[in-house]
Amino acid sequence: MTLRPGSLTLLIIAITAFGTRGLTYAQAGPKQVTVYIDSVMAADTNEGTDPRLAPMGAKLRGLFGFSTYSLIGHSEGQTDCGKMIAFTLPGGKILHVQPRAIDGDMIAMEIVLFDGTRPLMTTDLKLKNNGTLIVGGPRYEQGMMIISIGASTGGSHPMQAQVGTPAQANTR
């Protein structure tokens, strides 16, 4: 599937992510989750792929079909399960991530993407520890912004994960 800069659809590519329906939450006390956010500009300007995106550059090119991918922002933070953490993204976007529970090797979380104060996307999911979720679709400058969301309970950066199958977001 190729997504182009005029598309209004948000695309979520889950890398070892699963829905949270039917999840049993077994957790002993509060746990810390480290959340990693990379904002990537995708465009057709024939400038290649930013070397900082090397671990996922080929996957981005295969999924989105643009000629240029540039890292335009990186943020990370820690929060306890049940507590929301907010990230300011380029272009006036705000991302709220709330880890809800840790069940074995899975992190249940809610993600809300805002354009200013207007919600663009809300989704609940279960992401494998050290897994990554790629959200593509918000228009940004001459292309599209792609947001990579990683989560880890051990503090290690999860961006080395493998890309899974594209799926449509549950948007509100």
Image (cartoon, rainbow, N blue to C red):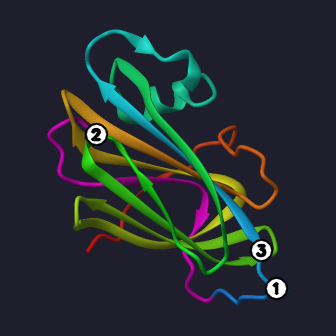
Mark 3 vs mark 2: in front: 3
Residue type indicated by callout 2: Leu
Residue 153 in the image: above or below residue 133: below
* Residue 1 visible in image: no
Q: CA distance from mark 3 to mark 2?
A: 37 Å
Q: Position of residue 88 (x, y in %)?
A: 39, 51
SS at mark 3? loop
Residue type indicated by callout 1: Gly
Residue type indicated by callout 3: Lys
Q: Position of residue 29 (x, y in %)?
A: 82, 85
Q: Position of residue 85 (x, y in %)?
A: 52, 65
Identify the disc placed on residue 3: 2
Q: Residue at x 53, y 72 (%)?
A: 84
**In magenta stretch: residue 10:** yes
Q: Residue at x 20, y 35 (%)?
A: 5
**Residue designated by label 3:** 31
The mark nearer the N terminus, 1 or 2, is 2
Residue 153 in the image: above or below residue 102: above
**Residue designated by label 1:** 29
What is the magenta range?
1-22
SS at mark 1? loop
Between residue 87 and residue 71, name the one nearer to us: 87
Q: CA distance from mark 1 to mark 2?
A: 42 Å
Q: Residue at x 42, y 71 (%)?
A: 123
Q: Residues within 10 Å of mark 1 (few under 14, many from 20)?
A: few
* Residue with the most extreme right position: 28
